Amino acid sequence: MRHIHASCGGAPRPKTACGWYYRCLFGSKARGDERWSIAKTQAAIAYTCENFKKEKRLMGTDIHLYMERQNANGSWSQVKAPPWPCHWCRGARYYPATDRSPKTECFGCKGSGKIDELRGYDRRNYNLFAMLADVRNGGVDTGDGFVPLAEPRGLPIDTSIRDSGEEIEYEDPRFVNLGDHSFSHCTLAEALEYDYTRVTQQRGVVSAAEYSAWVETGRKRPPKRYSDGVWGQGVKNVSQVEMDQLIRGGVIKTIGPKGPFDTRGEDGFSYYTTVQWEETYRKSAGEAWFQFLEACRALGEPSKVRFVFGFDS
């Protein structure tokens, strides 16, 4: 059964689908907690979603992507994703030792340097999700967005992939987890032929210290650390002009006594500003995506290799 989040409008929402419904409902059932009726769950989630919308915030989203190959008779069969370079350790196989932890085997590839699973690309990259299916392509202002390969197409009518449609799918090997919204599909050929040379404007919120470093690089490169927004008591979001004035006037120290993240002003507030830079679609998609696409060529003719995927939030 495919569950639909009633308090979010009665239908899956590509950009703001909410996972709290599933977490509350299935979690309460698993605990045997009868206090959480469906009506109470919907009421709680309606409240949560409304506040998230007011603040223009979204929950985290992940992709669930699986592979199919076309047979000689035109039907499709699910195939295992090809091994591809691990994006967690970037092929290093181990995480280096630090002051707090010893050298540790990568949990993603188990020390092999390759992702070797039934499931394909699984990195959380909202830029790529926007390109593939218009998911997370707006809502919070993180840039001008991307032209999607296609709006969500739904699952292919001839797919061989069986989705259990429940919150917990991992125990039965006959089924896979395709997420809970924005189901779509495309061929490897479509993914390879998509125009990654286009450019877009990206935006992010940075601290005073990060802003100073960004200015020194010419205001064109992406900052090292940024987010889609910073809120809370003791936080002030200002324009770049105001930030320049505060730094020049000595109101804000770009490096405080506790390090580069300690950039509170003399008035006790932490200041942040929004910066913008130009980026190609390829840069935004990330190198891990292209490593995965290249590995998929081993499965056969690109037009006969298909990605079937969905998202969870």
Image: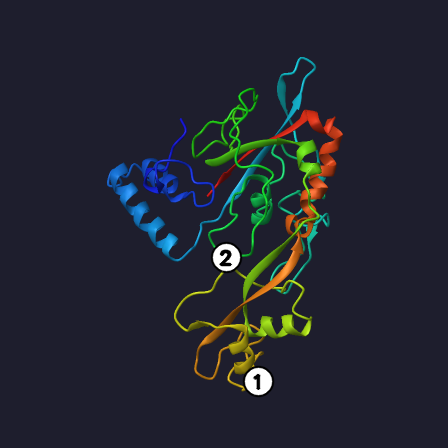
Q: What secondary structure is found at the residue carrying circle 2?
A: loop
Q: On the image, numbered disc 2 is attached to which residue?
A: 141
- In the depicted structure, whether residue 159 falls above or below residue 120: above
Can residue 284 be seen here? The reply is yes
Residue 65, position as x, y percentages in the image: 58, 35
Residue at image x 68%, y 71%?
Answer: 218
Q: Looking at this rendering, what residue extends furthest in the top direction?
A: 73
Label 1 and label 2: CA atoms lie apart by: 28 Å
Query: Between residues 48 and 28, which one lies in front from this camera angle?
Result: 48
In contact (CB < 8 Å): disc 1 and disc 2: no
* Residue at horizontal 35 percent and vertical 36 percent from the top: 10
Disc 1 marks a residue whose amino acid type is: Arg
Picture coordinates of residue 230, whole percent (x, y)? 47, 64
| Colouring method of the image | rainbow
Give coordinates of residue 222: x percent, y percent: 64, 62
Instruction: Name the residue: 50% across, 57% down.
Output: 141
Mark carried by residue 248:
1
Between 177 and 187, the one lying in front of the other is 187
Say which quarter of the image contains residue 96. Answer: bottom right
Say few, some or many: other residues with alpha carbon within 10 Å of mark 1 (under 14 / 14 to 19 / 20 or more): few
Q: Position of residue 30 (x, y in %)?
A: 35, 36
- Can residue 85 be seen? no
Q: Going by the image, does 169 lie left or right of 201?
A: left
Kind of residue at badge 2: Asp
